[in-house]
Amino acid sequence: MKFICLVYAEPGAVSNLPAGEKDALDRDSLAYDRELEAAGHFIAASALQGVRTARTVRVRKGKPLVLDGPFAETKEVLCGFIFIEAADADEAMRIAERIPMARYGTVEVRPELQF
């Protein structure tokens, strides 16, 4: 089964870390990606630019409505993802618990919808 691990954090949570801690987080994150790849769980991962670069589009009655920034009313915002392969939801959760960014934010785990 495929699962997406959506990583959320408050804006500035990572950029406000002391340089050594941020460097360690970057190293830990890349190392975990390599670990997942070696174990056959890794599909893709990426960090996202800040919310100031985001735009949201909705189409209503055939007309697009474009807004700057994310639309969600929340303190934490989407800042990256890891797309994984896992045997089941329990294994996906065990993988998500070890994502280094989970120490600074929230990781939502959701299975891929099969059509």
Image: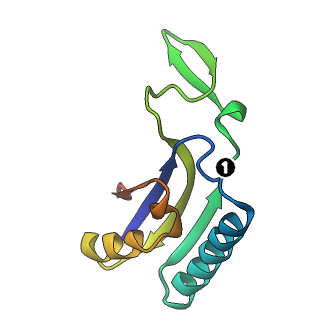
Residue 60: horizontal and vertical position, in percent?
49, 13
Residue labelled with disc 1: 16
Q: Which of 113/53 is in front?
A: 53
Above or below 50: residue 7: below
> How many numbered markers are drawn?
1
Which residue is located at x 46 percent, y 28 percent?
72
**7 left or right, relative to 29:** left
- Find residue 44 and report its image quarter: bottom right
56 displayed left or right of 84: right
Who's the residue at 62% across and 18% down the image? 67
| Mark 1: few/some/many CA within 10 Å (<14, 14-19, 20+) | few
* Residue at figure coordinates x 38%, y 70% from the top left: 97
Amino acid, disc 1: Asn
Q: Nearer the viewer, residue 84 or 34?
A: 34
- Dot 1 falls on a residue whose secondary structure is loop
Image quadrant containing the C terminus? bottom left
**Colour scheme used in the picture?**
rainbow
64 is higher (above) or lower (below) than 23: above
Q: In x, y percent, where is residue 50?
A: 68, 41
Quadrant assignment for the N terminus: bottom left
Q: How far from the left and from the top, in percent, is residue 43?
A: 55, 72
Q: Residue 91 falls in which quadrant of the image?
A: bottom left
Instruction: Give residue 21's quadrant in the image.
Output: bottom right
Residue 34 spot, x, y in % from top left:
61, 83
Q: Is residue 70 left or right of 95 when viewed as pictured?
A: right
Reply above or below: 42 against 63.
below
Front-most of residues 78 and 84? 78
